[in-house]
Image (cartoon, grey):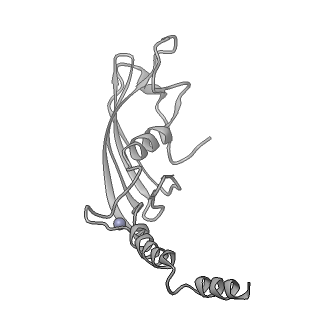
Amino acid sequence: MNTPFTFHIGDMRSGRAEPRTISGEVSVDWHVELSRVQSEPPLFFEFRLEAVAGGIAVTGTIEARVLHRCYRCLIEWEEPVLREVRQLITTVADEEEEADYRLDGDVFDFESVVRDELLLDLPIAPRCGPDCEGLVDAAGSDLNTSLSEDERGENSPFSVLKDLLDTGD
Ligand SMILES: [Zn+2]
């Protein structure tokens, strides 16, 4: 299957292969908790591929814009993200050693590389700033104040009702 992330790189198994640069611009719909990779503008990646012993070295960058939502006050903001990539695609077929990325056949799908590198460092609980007070806390303390006045009971409609009932006996 051909996607903007797939490239024919089988020839790079040969140690004599010339280094090559690949790149792509892709709209994705990826998110982690409260951070979302924007589909517009598309993310951009550019990798230099170099044949090395046992595999293909991948170095380069990924650029994207990410929309974060503050976990406390829910405000949203967008920021550019730049990731430096340094990975190895293993080409040795019979190697038992666990490899993150392996080339089977001639076509490699770089989607997992781009996705892993981009999403792994996104915050689990983004915060708009160190001074964020948060909506939840502000609303919660108002509610607490009015509840505790009611609990004191002096002006509560229920205490009036209770008096009426007591008189009735
Ligand atoms: Zn906030």
In this view, 6 is above or below 141: above
Residue at 51% across, 15% down: 93
In this view, 115 is above or below 40: above
Residue 91 percent coordinates (x, y): 46, 20
Residue 88: quarter of image: top left
Q: Is residue 38 left or right of residue 16?
A: right
- Taking the image as four quarters, which one is ligand 1 found in? bottom left
Q: Which x, y percent locates residue 152? A: 47, 76
Foreground of the two, 52 or 148: 148
Q: Residue furthest right?
A: 169
Q: Is residue 157 left or right of residue 45?
A: right
Q: Residue furthest front?
A: 169
Q: Residue at x 64, y 82 (%)?
A: 162
x and y percent of residue 34 in the render? 46, 57
The quadrant of the rendering that contains the C terminus is bottom right
Give the x, y percent position of residue 105.
Answer: 56, 25
Q: Give the residue furthest to the left.
A: 130
Residue 54 picture quarter: top left
Screen quadrant of the N terminus: top right
Residue 51 occupies quadrant: top left
Taking depth in this image into account, of 100 and 48 the one nearest to the observer is: 100
Q: Nearer the viewer, residue 102 or 15?
A: 102
The answer to whether residue 44 is above or below residue 75 is: above
